[in-house]
Amino acid sequence: MNRTASTDSSRPFTSTEGCQQDHQRWQQIICQQEEEIRQLRALLLDVMNHYNSRSLRHDAVDYYRDLNKLQIKLDRLHRDLVCERADCLVAEKNLACADSRFGLSATIERHATLLAHEFTRIKDGCLQFLAGMMSLNRL
């Protein structure tokens, strides 16, 4: 059922189609973040395997650990809120968009936004660390 208007104009409903588009957009953002996490972890593993400097290894381990924690949170978001398995029923996908004010659509957006901010913070620190390594000709 498509709802495009609300009796309370201060809280408009999103159409089911719009909700599903938002859902797909968050899936794409999450998948992109997961790929970037894999790439950053590979670079950090390289640092940990090639350099014995205690401070370099310590920073690399810290960023690697933060990225692992973030990956776990993204995995939970996929498992608990984003239905993308082949065996997902169409009805299950539509349930997420039944009422975007209270349903899974709003929950996905809230969680995904928080994780996006956390990812940006960790990524920025990690990239600064790696750039420092490059400026020292260590990478």
Image (spheres, grey):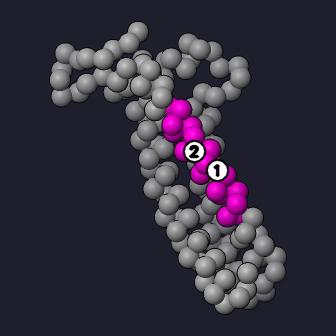
In-front residue for pair 20/55: 20
State the residue at coordinates (34%, 24%).
14
* Cα–Cα gap, marks 2 and 1: 6 Å
Q: Position of residue 130 (x, y in %)?
A: 64, 77
Up/down of 64 relative to 19, above or below: below
Q: Amino acid at mark 1?
A: Glu
Is residue 96 rendered to the left or right of residue 3? right
Quarter the N terminus occupies: top left
Is residue 35 rendered to the left or right of residue 124? right
Q: Position of residue 5 (x, y in %)?
A: 25, 17
Q: Amino acid at mark 2?
A: Ile
Looking at the image, can residue 104 be seen? Answer: no
Q: Main secondary structure of the magenta part?
A: helix
Q: Which residue is mark 1?
A: 34
Q: Position of residue 21 (x, y in %)?
A: 48, 29
Mark 1, secondary structure of its residue: helix
Up/down of 111 relative to 9, above or below: below
Dot 2 and dot 1 residues touching (CB under 8 Å): yes
34 inside magenta stretch: yes
Q: Which region of the structure is painted magenta?
A: 23-41
State the residue at coordinates (68%, 72%).
61
State the residue at coordinates (56%, 76%).
128
Q: Write down the quadrant of residue 139 in the picture.
A: bottom right
Q: Which residue is mark 2?
A: 30
- Farthest residue to the top: give it: 1
Count of numbered labels shown in the rendering: 2
